[in-house]
């Protein structure tokens, strides 16, 4: 059983998910949004070692805490990103577009691809490539726990914006249809912003999908 700590951090209220596996006392941070030292302290409070950072995509509000966490753990956690988001990552997540700044972030060292399996202790997550919000956006799906960390692809009653560099509306809609709405209705959607919802609820009520 995984334990999930949700933290709303940074200038645009991004959800950072600290996911711990109590048996191994290992943890992963999905989208270390901001305030890396704070996320690290929260992991320590639970007795967890953060050994992986998984990035749904490289926008600055999802990677602003990477540098801060890296300094807090030895060995430093691995950083996983889809290669199609490398240019955004190298441009510091596009922070300058928003008049923001983030600390220089170390290079990713795990390059994600569609269908890949990631491991947190005994639990498996499937990587699903979901371009449209950014070219290298991915979601992390855990079938056993019936949940998907879906970044900025889909939100409670909304969908990701497609007006930023590399965004494309029809690509996003295709990703939602093929990679999200194909999951069982009772799958929890843990998004990059706002509260959680369920696949079935969005399939029925999301005004952007009808
Ligand atoms: Zn984004
Ligand atoms: Zn975001």
Image (cartoon, grey):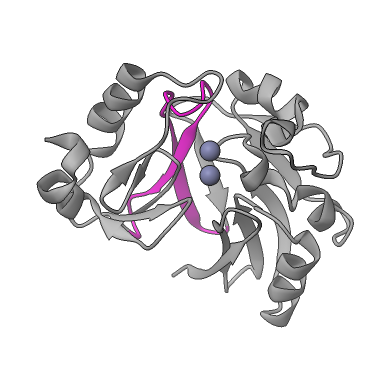
- Position of 108 relative to 17 (above/below): above
Q: 61 or 109, which lies in front?
A: 61
Looking at the rendered image, the quarter that the C terminus falls into is top left
- Position of 12 relative to 158 (above/below): below
Q: Residue at x 13, y 50 (%)?
A: 205
Percent x, y of residue 87: 69, 19
Percent x, y of residue 113: 52, 25
Q: Is residue 59 left or right of residue 149?
A: right
Magenta stretch containing residue 127, yes or no? yes
Q: Residue at x 71, y 29 (%)?
A: 89
Q: 128 or 132, which lies in front?
A: 132
Q: Is residue 4 left or right of residue 169?
A: right
Magenta stretch containing residue 55, yes or no? no
- Position of 153 relative to 163 (above/below): below
Query: Number of marks in the image?
Result: 0
Image quadrant in which you'd find residue 48: bottom right
Does any portion of residue 19 appear in the rendered image?
A: no
For the magenta stretch, what is the residue range? 121-145
Does any portion of residue 104 appear in the rendered image?
A: yes
Percent x, y of residue 71: 89, 56
Image quadrant in which you'd find residue 173: top left
Looking at the rendered image, the quarter that the N terminus falls into is bottom left
Q: Residue at x 56, y 20 (%)?
A: 165
Percent x, y of residue 98: 67, 37
Q: Is residue 27 left or right of residue 147?
A: right
- The single residue placed furthest to the front in the displayed view is 99
Q: Is residue 83 left or right of residue 69?
A: left
Q: 44 or 198, which lies in front?
A: 198
Q: 19 or 154, which lies in front?
A: 154
- The single residue placed furthest to the bottom in the displayed view is 45
């Amino acid at each position: 059983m995984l334990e999930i700590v949700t933290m709303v951090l940074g200038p645009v209220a991004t959800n950072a998910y600290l996911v711990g596996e109590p048996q191994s006392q290992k943890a992963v941070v999905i989208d270390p949004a901001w305030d890396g030292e704070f996320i690290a302290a929260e992991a320590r409070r639970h007795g967890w070692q953060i050994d992986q950072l998984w990035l749904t995509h490289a926008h600055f509000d999802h990677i602003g805490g990477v540098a801060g966490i890296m300094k807090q753990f030895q060995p430093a956690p691995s950083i996983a990103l889809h290669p199609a988001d490398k240019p955004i990552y190298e441009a510091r997540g596009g922070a300058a577009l928003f008049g923001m700044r983030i600390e220089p972030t170390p290079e990713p060292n795990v390059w994600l691809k569609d269908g890949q399996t990631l491991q947190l202790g005994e639990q498996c997550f499937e990587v699903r490539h979901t371009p449209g919000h950014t070219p290298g956006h991915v979601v992390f799906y855990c079938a056993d726990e019936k949940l998907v960390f879906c970044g900025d692809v889909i939100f409670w009653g909304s969908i990701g914006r497609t007006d930023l560099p590399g965004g494309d509306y029809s690509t996003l809609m295709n990703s939602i249809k093929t990679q999200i709405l194909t999951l069982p209705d009772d799958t929890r959607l843990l998004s990059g912003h706002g509260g959680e919802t369920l696949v079935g609820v969005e399939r029925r009520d999301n005004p952007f999908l009808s």
